[in-house]
């Protein structure tokens, strides 16, 4: 009698509410019960180091621009004017302009690699090295060529204009960096915005080259050769190097 009751109790114990239900899957192991987790893809806005670097760049930008506001305004007014012969006779330059230019140039050299990294997340250090090498190579090449063919006043005017335009590139590209990191701007949009800023800067540079080095009408041919050799050719090499790096890290 007791054995029969035991068997009946065991049968009822095995009987559950879901015996005839489509939701019953006894073949599934209980080891995987619950929600299966999936690894989230890497996103820039979740990277604390990237956010800290962007915040640092923003703060230095604000402080530097607030302290060098007069110099930036003065340089903007003189950007499209020919170099003055009495430039060295009167000390009318704002104080600390070299320091401000150096800081803004350094920040630009950080913004550009970060923007490239947001488009193609390969290696931030590699992008930084390439941009730094590109900038220093151009500066040395400009300095050597201009030292041979042009006087000191024109060279100083060009160095100021070039550093100023390069700094403005970083200032204009920084908002696009924020949009790319925190608002998921598409790679195509970032590329188009970046190319627009670069093209605008090259147009200003070619005009600067014209009014500083080749103000006469017969100097246009020399201007084309000069600008293509020192600006367009290095830019093409930079694009080629970045394409190779992106392909290597795929």
Image (tube, rainbow, N blue to C red):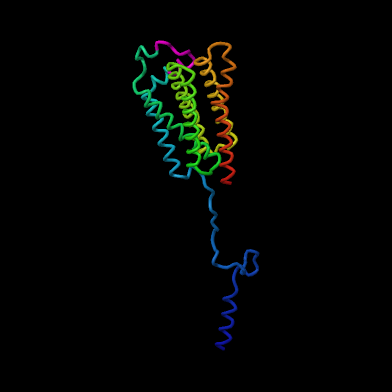
Give the residue displayed 58% in from the left and 37% down from the top. Answer: 187
Q: Give the total of numbered labels.
A: 0
Dominant SS of magenta comes to loop
Q: Nearer the viewer, residue 5 or 78?
A: 78
Image coordinates of residue 171 in percent, x first then y, are 47, 28
Residue 218 visible to the viewer: yes
Q: Does residue 190 show up?
A: no
Asked if the magenta segment contains residue 127, the reply would be: no
Residue 241 image position (x, y, % from top left): 56, 38
> Where are the magenta residues, as a range?
75-86
Quadrant including the N terminus: bottom right
**Front residue (pair 33, 62):** 62
Q: Position of residue 239 (x, y in %)?
A: 57, 34
Q: Nearer the viewer, residue 27 or 177?
A: 177
Q: Residue furthest front?
A: 148
Locate residue 229: give its quadrant.
Answer: top right
């Amino acid at each position: 009698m007791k054995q029969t009751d035991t068997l009946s109790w065991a049968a009822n114990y095995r009987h559950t509410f879901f015996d005839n239900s489509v939701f019953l899957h006894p073949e599934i192991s209980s080891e995987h019960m619950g929600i299966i987790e999936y690894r989230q893809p890497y996103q820039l806005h979740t990277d604390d180091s990237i956010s800290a670097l962007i915040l640092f760049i923003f703060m230095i930008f604000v402080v530097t621009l607030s302290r060098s506001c007069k110099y930036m305004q003065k340089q903007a007014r003189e950007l499209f004017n020919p170099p003055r012969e009495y430039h060295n006779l009167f000390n009318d330059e704002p104080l600390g302009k070299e320091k401000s230019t150096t800081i803004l140039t350094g920040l630009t050299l950080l913004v550009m690699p970060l923007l490239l990294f947001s488009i193609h997340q390969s290696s931030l250090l590699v992008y930084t090295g390439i941009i730094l090498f590109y900038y220093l190579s151009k500066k040395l090449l400009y300095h050597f060529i201009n030292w041979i063919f042009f006087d000191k006043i024109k060279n100083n005017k060009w160095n100021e204009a070039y550093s100023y335009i390069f700094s403005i590139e970083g200032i204009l590209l920084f908002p696009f960096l924020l949009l790319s990191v925190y608002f998921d701007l598409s790679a195509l949009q970032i590329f188009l915005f970046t190319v627009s800023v670069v093209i605008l800067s090259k147009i200003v540079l070619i005009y600067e080259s014209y009014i500083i080095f080749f103000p006469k009408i017969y100097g246009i041919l020399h201007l084309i050769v000069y600008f293509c050799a020192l600006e367009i050719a290095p830019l093409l090499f930079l694009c080629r190097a970045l394409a190779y790096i992106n392909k290597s890290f795929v």
